Structure formats: structure tokens, C-alpha cells
Amino acid sequence: MKKILISLFSGALLLCGTAIADSHEESSDGPDPATPVELFACKYNEGKGPADLDKVVDKWNAWADEQGLQDYSGWTLVPYYSGPDQEFDVIWLGGSDSAKMLGRAQDRWIATGGDVLNEFNEVWSCDIHANFAVLKYKTPPERSDPSNIVVSFSDCNLAEGTTFGDISPALSSWAEYRSGHGSTSGMWVFFPAYGGGGEEFDFKFISAWQNLEDQGVDYDQYNESGWKKAEELFAGKVDCDSSRVYLGTNRRRAADND
């Protein structure tokens, strides 16, 4: 289970509402302050599956409406490109614009969500509940279908003697390079905050696209010439493993701040 520590593309998903998809534009000097996401990694109980989860999510949304919960976004992610280390069926990724907002939503859930929580527990078992601090490096364009996205996660380690401050400008440059070459992705970095321990990575690098075709556009451009820019920016500074890719479905969207 060591490789699946994500408590969310928010970072990006994820991947996750205002914290992942619709927050402020990044400044030319670097990303905005970090925003929080929580992640649950879950397996379906025997005899249960996606249709059962959909029914409980509908009840959760009804509960959230009753509570006036307007500052929390949630996604479910299911593995698409994955390996044996992804020992789960589905990820729940949730986030808010601030840790205070996320904590307020969590307080409400603990205090009043017991009946719906019991129904979730009948559908799945979640061995991991983690929290990540998320930095956004590239804002995706407005999605034609914001309900569905494709999200990739890579585990990254800094080279000895290298700090994140050393590579943050490179990440900003990479985001600008991608934008200049037609990429429609969003890009984020996730730092483990709570619920982990013993991580074998320094941070997670997350990208998100509207669909697999848009992801393929970036794939092709990287293979043609983008790898040269990546080598220029990151060689000898950071090492990332191959990405896991998930298909994401929006379950609740926070109200816009505007």
C-alpha cells in the first residue's frame, strides 16, 4: 500500500473542485499558497460495485444540500493505467479553497453524516485517509465537460542536496512550455501532510486533462521534442516514476467565489 498514498489531481484532481480546477490564476513568480485535499483509497465490499456507490453519493449530496455545504468539491477516481501497487478500486478526492473550509466541512460530516457514512461503509472499505497540501503550477482551460477528467499521478524524489525551492522555478517553466505547445492540462504538486508516514517520495506530480485524447496530445509532443526541455529543466534534480492514470468523475462542485 506504500505506493498509493494520495488523499488527493487536488488535486487536479486532482483534480478537486476549487482547490484543483478553478482556483486563482498562478502568478508569474510561482504558484499560489497551498490548498488542502483529502483522499480515501477504498475497495468495494463483496457484492458491491459502482452502481451501489452512485446511490450512496446521491444521498451524500442530498445531505450536503441540507447542510448548505457550498465550499467542498469531491471526485471519484478509478484506475485506468495501473499496476499491482494500486491495491484499491476507487479513490475519493475532496478539497476546499482553505484548510479552514475543509475542516468545517469535515466537522459537519462527523457531527451529522452518520447515517450516510454507514451506507458508504456498507459499499466500500477505505484503508487510507490522507491529506495533501497542493500547489498549482498550470491552470487548465475551462472544460467542456467538467464532470469527467483524466488524471495522472507520479511519485517524485529530489536529488541529494536539492530542495523543492531549487526546482519550483523549473516547474513553472515547464508549465509555460507546455502551454506554449498546445497543452490543455492542469499541473499540480502534492505534498504529504497528514495520514501517511514512511512515504517513499518527496512529492506527487499531478496532471489532468479533459479526456484521453488530450492526454495523448501531450504524450506525442513529449516524445517528439518535449523530452529535451524536460531534460534541460529537471535532469539531475528530480526523479519521478511512471505515472498512474485515473478516470475521474465529479461528485460535487464548490460554489464559485465570484
Image: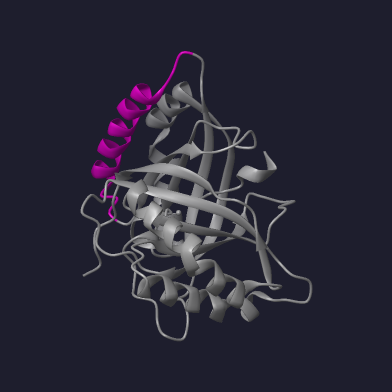
Query: Quadrant location of the N terminus?
Result: top right
Residue extending farthest to the right is: 160
Residue 164's spot in the image, x, y percent? Answer: 64, 74
**Closest to the observer, 198 or 255:** 198
**Closest to the observer, 251 or 77:** 77
Secondary structure mostly seen in magenta is helix
Residue 56 drawn in magenta: yes
Residue 92's spot in the image, x, y percent? Answer: 45, 41
Residue 93's spot in the image, x, y percent? Answer: 45, 47
147 versus 143 height, above or below? above
When asked about the image quadrant of residue 114, the answer is top left
The residue lying at 38 percent from left, 43 percent from top is: 248
Q: Which residues are magenta?
A: 47-70
**Closest to the observer, 211 or 253:** 211
The residue lying at 31 percent from left, 52 percent from top is: 210
When asked about the image quadrant of residue 159, the answer is bottom right
Residue extending farthest to the top is: 47
Query: Quadrant location of the C terminus?
Result: bottom left
Residue 210 drawn in magenta: no
106 versus 124 height, above or below? below
The residue lying at 71 percent from left, 73 percent from top is: 236
**Residue 35 in sight:** no
**Residue 74 in sight:** yes
Taking the image as shown, residue 113 lies to the left or right of residue 7, namely left
The residue lying at 46 percent from left, 21 percent from top is: 122
Residue 165's spot in the image, x, y percent? Answer: 62, 80
Residue extending farthest to the bottom is: 29
